Image (tube, helix red, strand yellow):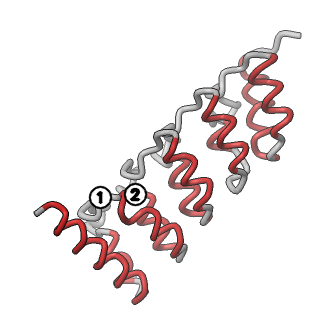
Amino acid sequence: MVLSEIDAGKNLTAAASRGNVKELRRMLEEQHVHPDTVNEFGRTALQAMMMGSTSVACLLLEHGANANVQDRLGVTPAHDAARAGFVDTLQVMVQFGASVNTQDNTGALPIHVAIREGHIDVVEFLAPRSNLNHQDTSGYTALDVARALRCPGLVELLERQFESSLKFQA
C-alpha cells in the first residue's frame, strides 16, 4: 500500500507520539518513510515524539532525522526536551548532532528554557555545552534568568561553569 506523504507523516508522527517503536521501525525500514516527513501540522516525528522515549529518539536519529529541525517559533527538539526535563532524551539528541546553541524566536537557548522550568539536571548537562554569553531577545543570559528567578543553586552552578570556561580559554 502506497501512502501519500501527508498520510505517511501523520502515521509516523502518531507512532512517535505514542512511543510505538515497533510501528516506527516498520514504517522507516519496510515502508521507507523518511524520518523527517511532516504531518498535517508541519511537524516531524522527532518534534511530535513522546519526549521521554529515548528509544524513539534513537530510532529516528539513526534513520537520519534532522536533530536541529525548528518549528515556526524556532523551537527545536532540544528546546522541547529541556522544557520537559528529559535529560536522557537530550543526551541522545546531542550525540546525534543536536545543537544546544540554536535559539528560538525569543532568542532562548535550551538552557534558558531548562532554567525557567527548574530542571537542574538538564541545566547541569547543558551548561558546559552552551554559550553562556548568549542573550535572548530581552537581553538575558542563562545566568541572568537564574538570578531573576532567584534560583541560588542554578546561579552557583552557572557561575562555576562560566569561571571554568574562562580558565579554559586563558
Please identify the residue farthest to the top as the structure is shown: 2
Q: Residue at x 54, y 53 (%)?
A: 91
Q: Position of residue 159 (x, y in %)?
A: 28, 79
Q: How many marks?
A: 2
Q: Residue at x 29, y 64 (%)?
A: 132
Give the residue type that dot 1 points to: Asn
Relative to residue 148, is residue 82 depicted above or below? above
Q: Residues within 10 Å of mark 2 (few under 14, many from 20)?
A: many
Q: Position of residue 88 (x, y in %)?
A: 61, 58
Q: Residue at x 37, y 57 (%)?
A: 129
Q: Nearer the viewer, mark 2 or mark 1?
A: 1
Dot 2: element: loop
Where the N terminus falls, by quadrant?
top right
Give the residue type that dot 2 points to: Leu
Left-right relation of 84 to 143: right
Mark 2 or 1 closer to N-term? Answer: 2
Where the C terminus falls, by quadrant?
bottom left
Q: Position of residue 65 (x, y in %)?
A: 59, 31
Residue under label 1: 131
Relative to residue 26, is residue 92 depicted above or below? below
Q: Determine contact: label 2, label 1, CB under 8 Å.
A: yes
Dot 1: element: loop
Q: Which mark is residue 109?
A: 2
Left-right relation of 3 to 83: right
